[in-house]
Image: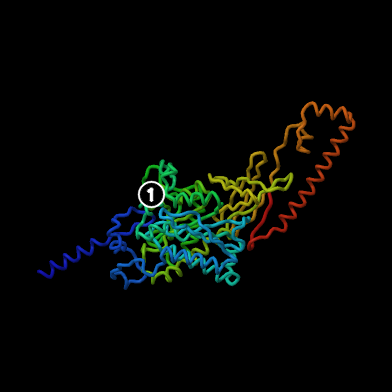
Amino acid sequence: MDHAFSFLFLSLYFSSLLHPTVARGGEQRSKPSDYIDKVYSGSVRQLFEENQSETRLDIARGYMTNSDLEKAVKAFGRRCSNISRIYSIGKSVKGVPLWVMEISDRPGEEEAEPAFKFIGNVHGDEPVGRELLLLLANWLCDNYMRDPLATLIIENVHLHILPSMNPDGFSLRRRGNANNIDLNRDFPDQFFPLNDDVGMRQPETRAIMRWLKEIRFTASASLHGGALVANYPWDGTLDKRKDYYACPDDETFRFMASVYSRSHNNMSLSKEFPGGITNGAFWYPIYGGMQDWNYIHGGCFELTLEISDNKWPNANELPTLWEFNKMSMLNLVASLVKTGVHGKIFSSDCGRPLPASIAIKGINYTVEAGSAFADYHRLLAPGEKYEVMATLPGYKSKTTCISLEEKAMTLDFVLDPEVRPKGNLLQSVCDCSCDGKSKHELVEFFGRTYLEIFLVLIVILAFLCFLLKRRVLFNHLKHRQSVGPKRSGVV
């Protein structure tokens, strides 16, 4: 009887130390003082079964410290200086720099290429991402000009990697930052007036928001832990109910999430999440999340990737987690140039690039072309027909229908200026302004006949100039460098 009572007491004691893991930003249910004892769940799947019963006092053993991470980032920058640039987007609450590795064949230069960003360690107690992102950067460096996928990414994408958004939370072994704020609840929300006070946002959050103003990212992904699934918008609902709530680009996001899931070793085999993907609101709603904010305010298609069932696995599992996620990360970045519609927008009267907007019929979301090269990169799910329209105030809109297959498509637009009112021919040709008095003096000087001849000559010269620039424009389009077996078109 005594033995039975002792067994029951020990069972209840050890069961009290275990709690289910909540991923993607569930509420922290333990106090910081007893967090280390409760970080592992008794219900989650493990990569190494023999470690489940092991008592782990130092959960960070084998992981890079913040100092180690900074040294590793700078060492990468020195070793791979030909394809990388190291910069900081700000500092944490405790003053730790938020280091970024940019990887490209022309780092730091603005090009007509899509940009992708990876963000790791959003939650301090989910450190797998920071380790895997360093491995990803070094793999790309080691395999440039050796592996076709590495070469494709480096030569056609500007990849930006932020290994740790929350270095303070990592050092404290807790979810929130140094102010104990969940950074994935600290962004402005589309449904509720959360975080509208700029001064109340955390420095890490403000750094991300400034980053998106400086760089026009096409897509993004943040790496989390506690589950195994690719999560996509929307993350919340208007009535706070758990329900599937699709964003305008739901099909595109499902495709992107499936690219990651299908490339993973076992994510797509999930019994909890069909296909290894989920709509965030259907899983459980959150508000103030980074994912929705990126899509709404940054023009950036972001996924939330849960890459490890265990939030803080033993460090000896990291090589396995890297192998499981490597192709998923690579294929997701490569999808920016392997699929979708890409192109530039020009003016027909002078051939200059136009920062126009690209809209898709039936999808309430527009993509802006860049101001420098007027390049746009519109992610779309393949295997569908789309009606693509380019618009810019002062120019006639143009629309064309495309059938998007598995490969990317290049589609350039040449927009015509809106016709100016009659009687303003001289002004439209030479773009000068003359008041009434100067016009009268001009007529007096030349006489009516000479003025007509002068106008005809101006029109002829303008027409010849138009033909010359048109020829230059189409020669430029003809010799554009294409990526892979793309289809091309000009509208």
In the displayed structure, 468 sits above or below 270; it is above
The residue under label 1 is 285
Can you give x and y, in whole percent of width and height, for residue 357 in the image? 60, 45
Task: Describe the element under mark 1 as helix, strand or loop.
Answer: loop
129 vs 409, left or right, is left
Instruction: Using the image as rendered, state which of residue 263 and residue 393 is in the foreground.
Output: 393
Q: Residue furthest left?
A: 1
Q: Locate residue 108: give its quadrant.
A: bottom right
**In the displayed structure, would residue 414 be above or below residue 163?**
above
Figure quadrant of the N terminus: bottom left
Q: What is the number of callouts on the image?
A: 1
Out of 71 and 407, give the one closest to the viewer: 71
Please name the residue shown 23% across and 63% down the image: 15
Residue drawn at (28%, 58%) of the image = 33
Residue 156, given in percent of the width and then of the height, sits at 60, 61
In the rendered structure, the answer to whether residue 455 lies left or right of residue 26 reads: right
Q: Give whichever of 133, 255 is nearer the camera.
A: 133
Neighbor class of circle 1 (other Cα within 10 Å; few <14, some 14-19, many 20+) is: many
Q: Residue drawn at (66%, 49%), measured in percent from left and top?
A: 345
List x then y, in percent, for residue 453. Answer: 88, 35
User: In this view of the protein, which residue sits in the foreground, 186 or 327?
Assistant: 186
Figure colour scheme: rainbow
In the rendered image, residue 7, in percent from the top left (x then y), is placed at 16, 68
Residue 303 appears left or right of 346: left
- Quadrant of res 410: bottom right
Q: Amino acid at mark 1?
A: Pro
